[in-house]
Image: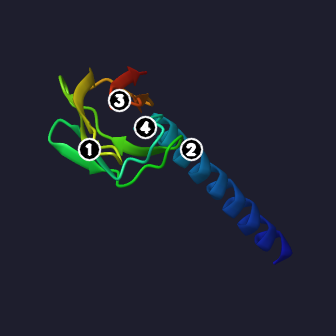
Amino acid sequence: MKNRKVLVVIGSVVLAAILLVIWVSMSLAQNRVAVVNQSQQAIPMITVTVGSDVYPLGTIEDNTAKTVIFAPIAGGVFAVDGFLEDGTVVAGQVGSTTTDMRGVVVNIVVGSDGALTYKQ
């Protein structure tokens, strides 16, 4: 009886470890786009569109970033649409996606004049 309990505990620990490895592997394989605010003011509203998928990010305070997971689309671009606290428009298309993207982190930096810089 005692050996059976030990086997059940060991089996549970092994199963939990396998599930953890799968979860970590899947997390690392996800693509992320981060909008980094270096504009010296808040961004009250901003969205990122990849292909036909729209990702609203809401408010981003100065010197912070918000990140979303995106699905890669062949020939897709990152379209950004929003505005700075003073009303300056933040909009444009930067970078592109391919279907073979795995575990990519894309940074779109918003500058003080609303200009966008793409970094991968």
Q: Within 10 Å of the Cα at label 3, are there few (<14), some (14-19), or many (20+) other Cα atoms?
A: few
Res. 109 image quadrant: top left
Q: Quadrant of residue 118?
A: top left
Residue kind at label 4, given as amino acid type = Ala
Q: Whole-Å distance between the Cαs marked 2 and 4?
A: 20 Å
Residue at numbered disc 4: 34
Given contact means CB atoms under 8 Å apart, are the residues at marks 3 and 4 in contact?
A: no
Front residue of 61 and 21 = 61
68 relative to 6 in the view: left or right: left
Q: Which residue is mark 3?
A: 113
User: What is the x, y in percent for residue 4?
Assistant: 77, 71
Amino acid type, callout 2:
Val
First in sequence: mark 1 or mark 3? 1
- Give x and y (percent) for residue 23: 53, 48
Q: CA distance from mark 1 to mark 3?
A: 13 Å
Q: Earlier in the sequence, mark 2 or mark 4?
A: 2
Q: Residue furthest front?
A: 86
Residue at horizontal 71 percent and vertical 68 percent from the top: 8
Say which amino acid is labelled 3: Asp
**Circle 2 Cα neighbour tier, 10 Å, few/some/many (<14 / 14–19 / ≥20):** few
Q: Which residue is mark 1?
A: 82
